[in-house]
């Protein structure tokens, strides 16, 4: 019986994920979620108090883990080592380790959090995460080039990162492997070009 209950809950979550991705939180309908999960309104309320509760369950893990990643990135990054690698093949291999640590967070539920949460208590999260990421970028900019004169670039780049992730996830949400490959390519480019600042510190 317990297995059946967990299966039904997961069916509701998957149906809700589809509905929120398609319509956003505000326009999503519990009736549509119920229909997609082949259950009843009454059964839905056995698992979730309301629409907001099912949305929260969908996004909370990715929110906590992505925020933790931004606040504790130094525990998994080897920034100085990466910038010392001259062999591009070794550099890509090492950088891929870092990217793989981010991958579990960059999925459809991340897209829900940053693009479909208007009308929920999490509507502010994208702005908060962009601010965290901006601070993260500035740490690296100051490390590589302490006299870099364009502080505004950190905010611009962090905003670009989120908009790029949203666009990739929107266009590849039916193809997880393609989504992973495109995110890898974007991060190789974005993180790799930041290393160009290293030279400015010595100019």
Image (cartoon, grey):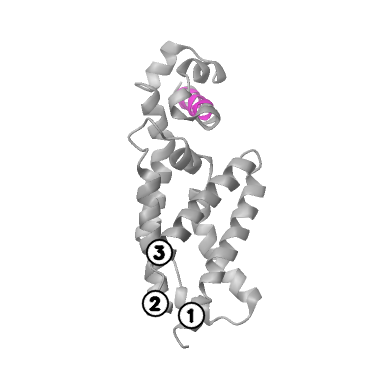
- C-alpha span from label 3 to label 1: 18 Å
Q: Where is residue 134 in the image (x, y as percent from the top left)?
A: 39, 60
Q: In this view, does 63 lie above or below 43?
A: below
The answer to the question of whether label 3 and label 2 lie on touching residues, with beta carbons closer than 8 A, is no
Would residue 187 appear left or right of 129 to someone viewing this image? right
Residue at point 43%, 45% (across, down)? 62
Q: Earlier in the sequence, mark 2 or mark 1?
A: 2
Does dot 3 land on a helix, a strand or a loop? helix
Does dot 2 land on a helix, a strand or a loop? helix
Q: Position of residue 70 (x, y in %)?
A: 39, 58
Q: Which mark is residue 98?
A: none
Residue in the foreground of this view, choosing between 144 and 101: 144
Majority secondary structure of magenta residues: helix
Q: Position of residue 165 (x, y in %)?
A: 54, 50
Q: What stretch is highlighted in magenta?
A: 5-16
What residue does disc 2 label?
Answer: 143
For disc 1, the neighbor class at 10 Å (few under 14, some 14 to 19, many from 20) is some
What residue does disc 3 label?
Answer: 152
The answer to the question of whether label 2 and label 1 lie on touching residues, with beta carbons closer than 8 A, is no
For disc 2, the neighbor class at 10 Å (few under 14, some 14 to 19, many from 20) is some
The answer to the question of whether label 3 and label 1 lie on touching residues, with beta carbons closer than 8 A, is no
- Does residue 92 belong to the magenta stretch? no
- Does residue 7 belong to the magenta stretch? yes
3 or 1: mark nearer the eye: 3
- C-alpha span from label 3 to label 2: 16 Å
3 or 2: mark nearer the eye: 3
Q: Where is residue 85 in the image (x, y as percent from the top left)?
A: 56, 80
Residue at point 37%, 70% (across, down)? 139
What residue does disc 1 label?
Answer: 198
Residue at point 58%, 46% (across, down)? 167
Q: Earlier in the sequence, mark 3 or mark 1?
A: 3
């Amino acid at each position: 019986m317990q297995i059946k209950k967990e299966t039904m809950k997961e069916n509701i979550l998957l149906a809700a994920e589809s509905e929120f991705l398609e319509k956003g939180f505000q326009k999503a309908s519990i009736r549509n979620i119920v229909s997609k999960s082949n259950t009843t309104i009454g059964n839905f309320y056995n698992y979730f108090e309301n629409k907001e509760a099912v949305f929260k369950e969908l996004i909370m893990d990715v929110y906590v883990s992505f925020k933790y990643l931004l606040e504790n990135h130094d525990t998994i990054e080897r920034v100085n080592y990466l910038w010392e690698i001259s062999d591009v093949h070794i550099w890509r291999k090492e950088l891929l380790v870092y990217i793989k640590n981010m991958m579990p967070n960059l999925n459809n539920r991340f897209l829900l959090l940053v693009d479909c949460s208007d009308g929920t208590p999490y509507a502010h999260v994208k702005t908060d995460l962009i601010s965290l990421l901006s601070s993260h970028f500035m740490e690296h900019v100051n490390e590589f080039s302490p006299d870099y004169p364009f502080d505004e670039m950190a905010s611009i780049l962090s905003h670009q990162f989120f908009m790029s992730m949203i666009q990739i996830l929107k266009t590849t949400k039916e193809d997880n492997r393609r989504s992973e490959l495109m995110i890898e390519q974007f991060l190789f480019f974005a993180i790799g070009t930041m290393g160009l600042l290293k030279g400015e510190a010595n100019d």
